[in-house]
Every structure is written in C-alpha cells, then in structure tokens.
Amino acid sequence: MKDERGQDVFIPVQDAAAYITEEFCAALEVFCVSENMGCLPFAGGWAEQPEWMTSAISILKVERWKADEEERELKQQEQEGARKHVK
C-alpha cells in the first residue's frame, strides 16, 4: 500500500493493533458480507442503509480498487522487466 506521496506504507506488526479497531473490524465485516453476498446489508437501496455502512462500503471499495491498481502496475513492471531480459 502507498501513502498520498506514493511511498510504501509500512506498519510494524507490534503497531498493527493500534490500526485494527473494533470499528474497523465492523466496517470490514459489513464490506466483506456485502461483497460476498452481492447485496447491501439491509433491504432497500443505498438510501435505506445506515450512513456509517454506506461510508464504510464506499471507502473500502476505493481502497480495494487502489490496492488492485498497485498490484496491476507491479505485474506490468515485472512483465516489462522480463521482456527486457529476453531481448
């Protein structure tokens, strides 16, 4: 993962607990369930969901997209590097 300046983010294992709060775990659970089930947590559309849930789902979708994009870029760089060695 990268910060806003594009630098790698490193969180030491001993500090991880400070970032993984009860609220984060609840948000992650809501996100995972909604993604795995393919639906929102409560009946109805986005307007019928609690605000914290819509925020959590939206934020985590963006973060997943960013992580996927970083992974795609790394794979592309690796492929380009491999092609250079073949020539």
Image (cartoon, helix red, strand yellow):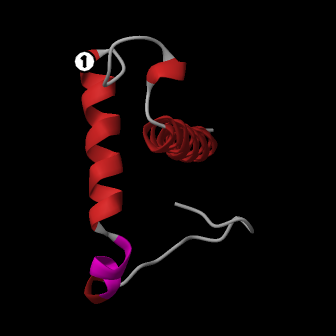
Q: Nearer the viewer, residue 21 or 1?
A: 21
Residue 23, position as x, y percentages in the image: 34, 60
Q: Amino acid at mark 1?
A: Met
- Residue lying at 41% horizontally and 11% vertically, measured from the top left: 44
Q: Which residue is located at x 33 percent, y 13 percent?
A: 43
In the image, is residue 47 above or below residue 60? above
- Residue lying furthest top in this view? 44
Report which quarter residue 21 is drawn in: bottom left
Q: Which residue is mark 1?
A: 37
| Principal secondary structure, stretch drawn in magenta | helix
Q: Secondary structure at mark 1?
A: helix
The magenta segment is 15-19
Asked if residue 31 lies in the magenta stretch, the reply is: no
Rendering quarter of residue 4: bottom right
On whether residue 18 falls in the magenta region, the answer is yes
Q: Residue 11 occupies which quadrant of the picture?
A: bottom left
Spot occupied by residue 86 in the image (x, y as percentages of width and height): 55, 39
Q: Nearer the viewer, residue 73 or 43?
A: 43
Q: Nearer the viewer, residue 17 or 77?
A: 17
In this picture, is 27 found above or below 83? below
Q: Position of residue 84 (x, y in %)?
A: 63, 44
Q: Where 83 sits versus 15, above or below? A: above
Tell me if residue 86 can be seen.
no
